[in-house]
Image (cartoon, grey):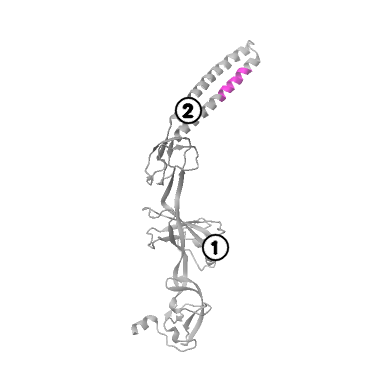
Amino acid sequence: MVTVTPQRLTVTTDLPGRTSPYRIAEIRPQVSGVLQKRLFEEGSEVKQGQQLYQIDATPYQAQLVGAQAALDHARATLVFAKLTVTRYKELLASNVISQQTYDSAIATLDQDQADVSAGEAALDTARINLTYTRVLSPITGRTGRSVTEGALVTANQATPLVIVQQLDPIFVDIPQATEALLRARRDVAGHALSSGGPGATSATGGLGGDNQAAVTLNLEDGSAYQHPGRLQFLEVTVQEGTGSVIRRAVFPNPQTLLLPGMFVMAHIEEGVIADAMLLTQRGVARDVHGAASALVVAPDQTVQRRELTIERAVGDAWLIAAGLKSGDLVIVEGLQKVKPGAAVHATPMAAAATSK
């Protein structure tokens, strides 16, 4: 038999999940033209701001030259309009010209100023379009399949030239049933479950923004992933089809062992029970209706049956929510040989093993 002793227990939840990129960028051209060069290898790592493609820049260089010439012409016209207004102002004071002639010169000056502003905007547009012929990566990440040189591309086309994904760190999206989430929240509210450390508040649902509970992973082949992660946030919308919410964890991925779309098993540290009652599964019996019970040695050395409320399995033991108290002696060997009310001689499990 064993003596029930409260102990500190870190409660974990095992849930399946799938990996997804930390950041993803679909690279599309912002100007149309023929793709002259691809400046990276498919599947390689690229840096933020690195040039990926060169689109034929010849027509855009010509547009830039034309826009510069049009702006120079507008500026020259503006200079002449300013000089005309200055002369007409003196002539108007001497009554050599009419007020209408002077007003016409003022209107022409305003038009020429507007032409200069339009020319400056057209020049800026031409410069921007010329810059867009150099297609850059907005993020650091791993490239996928790409189009080749010679392809005709169009501005803002639907099909990306290449997709760049940042894989270090990487996200793991973990669906959890709302029933389990509500139960964890009730445990926290009733102080049955407390946070296991600074920031470990996942059992509260992660709605407060400080959701940093520890998470570990097992890969598809059952092996343990060596880098621990942290819960980042909890989705606030329940998926109607499954009745679950997504908990997102972030993991370091320096060896790129985790790839987007992989299936993993996540082990989430929900919190700590300071006075958990654990009982080996050998000491628990169930009746035909599935109700759990244990045989306890009373102070008068007789056997009593205790109905148990079991919370969950913890390794080879059960976490007992109700039915046992600290110091209870529970029979775990020879259950078929004793019955409630029988007189027994209590022998600790370790001593019994020594005497054999």
Q: Residue 68 has which mark?
A: none
Q: Quadrant of residue 102?
A: top right
Label 1 packing within 10 angstroms: few (<14), some (14-19), many (20+)? some
Residue 26 as seen in the image, left or right of residue 114:
left
Question: Residue at horizontal 50%, vertical 31%?
Answer: 125
Please say if the residues under marks 1 and 2 sit with CB atoms less than 8 Å apart.
Answer: no
Tag 2's secondary structure?
A: helix
Question: Residue at horizontal 50%, vertical 83%?
Answer: 305
Give the mark nearest the N terminus, 1 or 2: 2
Q: Nearer the viewer, mark 1 or mark 2?
A: 2
Q: Quadrant of residue 57?
A: top left
Q: Residue 178 has which mark?
A: 1
> Dominant secondary structure of the magenta stretch?
helix
Of the residues shown, which amino acid type is indicated by label 2?
Gln
Q: Measured from the top left, where is residue 224 in percent x and y?
A: 38, 62
Of the residues shown, which amino acid type is indicated by label 1?
Thr
Q: Which residues are magenta?
A: 103-114
Q: Which residue is mark 2?
A: 63
Question: Can you say which quadrant of the picture contains the C terminus?
Answer: bottom left
Q: Measured from the top left, where is residue 261 in percent x and y?
A: 44, 55
